[in-house]
Amino acid sequence: MTVETRTFISLDDLVGFELTCLQCKVKSVFEVGGINQPVICPMCGEKWFDRESDSRRAKLNQFFWQVVELKKLLQSFPTDGIKLSVRLEITSHTQSVSK
Ligand SMILES: [Zn+2]
């Protein structure tokens, strides 16, 4: 028998981002809304993007702020005629159970 557990989180469960510097391996945790333009490792000073114009840098920063906006948006659910809630599914692990 296989038991499959599905795990969901609400946006309220999402409280921070962990960034790992690939140079010094130090992990830095930033609260949602508390990170803007992460470009340099706070520990070793390594520049995380070789090219300042790398579009992925802006897209990552955009993502961080979109999470802030989405959290605010979803906090207004389910009011004002909205009959919907949203959660995120995260990776689950299946477990074989012998019977
Ligand atoms: Zn570092």
Image: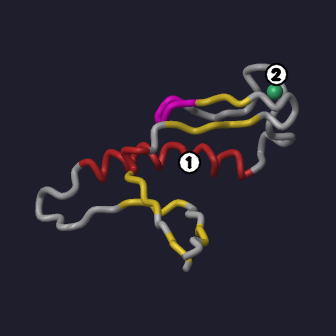
Q: Quadrant of residue 99?
A: bottom right
Q: Position of residue 87 (x, y in %)?
A: 38, 60
Tell me if label 2 and label 1 are in contact, CB under 8 Å: no
Residue type of the residue flagged with mark 2: Gly
Query: Residue at 46% across / 48% down in the picture?
Result: 67
Residue 53, position in %: x, y? 77, 45
Q: Which amino acid is tagged 1? A: Gln
- In the image, taking residue 11 as reference, residue 60 lies left or right, namely right
Can you give x and y, in whole percent of width and height, for residue 93 in the image?
A: 59, 64
First-in-chain label (2 vs 1): 2
Q: Which residues lie in the magenta part?
A: 30-34
From mark 2 to mark 1, how far is it between C-alphas?
Answer: 22 Å
What is the basis of the colouring in this image?
secondary structure
Residue lying at 74% horizontally and 36% vertically, measured from the top left: 20
Q: Main secondary structure of the magenta part?
A: loop
Front in this rendered view, residue 98 or 27 = 98
In x, y percent, where is residue 74? 30, 53
- Residue at 61% of width from left, 72% of height from top? 96
Q: Does the beta carbon of the residue at mark 2 sit less than 8 Å from ligand 1?
A: yes
For the residue pair 20 and 70, the one nearer the viewer reads as 20
- In the image, residue 77 sits, relative to residue 83, either above or below, namely above
Mark 1, residue position: 62
* Residue assigned mark 2: 45
For this view, does 13 lie left or right of residue 29? left
71 sits to left or right of 32: left
Query: Magenta span has 26?
Result: no
**How many residues crowd around disc 1 within 10 Å: few (fewer than 14), some, or many (20 or more)?**
few
